[in-house]
Amino acid sequence: MTSVAYQLVGERVDRHRFPPVGKLVNVHGKRVHVWCEGDHGPTVVVATGIGSTCLEWATVQRQLVPGHRVLLYDRGGLGWSDWVPGRRSPAELADELHAVLEAADAPGPYVLVGHSLGGSIIRMYAARHPDQVAGLVLVDSSHELSTDKIVEEFGWRMGDYSRWKRAITRYLLRPRGIERARVRLLGYRYYHDWAEKEVPADLVETSVALDLTSRRRRAVVAEMLHNGAASKDAMATERRHFGDLPLTVITRGHNPVNAYAVSDDPVFQRRWMKIWMPLQQDLATLSHNSRHIIADNAGHNIHLDEPDLVGKAIKDMCDEIRATMSSNRP
């Protein structure tokens, strides 16, 4: 009970210390955090990876604003957004994004940017609302065949998946008050060290406070459990070719050192990239008007490792769309 009380009091104090950087909009009775900056369309909308808040994209946002309108948001349970129970697969998250854009009264058309899981979300959104989408940027995006290919290459079986689910459940049940006390009272640096890699210096303490919330833990677990194999069929069913829609696919580099954080073993990393690169190349075939960019100096979090590259790719797409819109005016 002491842990629970400490967590509740700590979250209440943090809510006053770190108010939302954007605004809270009502979506189906829940508050969702939306952070929109900049003046000029098309509106760039970013869908983050599993468990990531909008603050992770602040560096890229600052490169684009004020010359571009950039909308960042926190999915249910992340950042300043209320926890949303239920399935958190790309289908549900794409519907959530649609409701968020309507509630925020954000003007279209949209350039949708998706990292990792966010890539699946924006693909699903574009399949369901093609008239609202001006372009897609997939940043080391997930692919519907990722899980099958991993099992095929590494031989992971249901026993491994069951152990993984048990580990996630233990994480869910870990008392957050104890974790908060380690950080706030004992100087545990884990959360600060990660935040310093992920967000600008002025947002580090804010990021740590958001990571320590109970709702964030629930959101991370829900998104992990409802993706991968569980979302494969839905993604395959709604797979679309987007015609001549501008599409940019940005993929982590071939360098095995940067391949993936699951293991430091170079052999494992090379085998992982043998799976990952063909899937990324497949994503680039989803439009006749596509570019495939390799971020040679980046790992999975390309927007953190090479924010200039990601920012430029978004700017280039917006410039292309603006030029097309201008030429089509009577």
Image (cartoon, grey):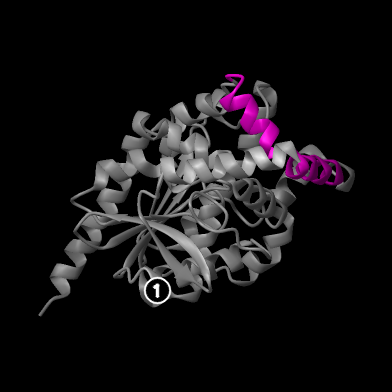
SS at circle 1: helix
Say whether residue 251 is magenta.
no
Q: Is residue 76 left or right of residue 163?
A: left
Which is nearer the eye, 179 or 172? 179
- Amino acid of disc 1: Glu
Q: Position of residue 290 (x, y in %)?
A: 38, 56
| Residue in the foreground of this view, choosing between 63 and 169 | 169
Q: Residue 268: horizontal and vertical position, in percent?
A: 69, 28
State the extent of the magenta-drawn residues as a range: 161-187
Residue at the extreme bottom: 330
Q: Is residue 50 left or right of residue 56?
A: right
| Residue pointed to by mark 1 | 102
Secondary structure predominantly adopted by residues drawn in magenta:
helix
Report whether residue 255 is seen: no
Which of 316 and 274 lies nearest the eye of the viewer? Answer: 316
Residue 239 position (above or below residue 33): below
Q: Residue at x 68, y 55 (%)?
A: 227
Residue at position x 43%, y 31% from top? 204
**In front here: 241 or 24?**
24
Quadrant of the rendering where the N terminus is positioned: top right
Q: Residue furthest right?
A: 159
Q: Residue furthest top?
A: 187
Mark 1: few/some/many CA within 10 Å (<14, 14-19, 20+):
few
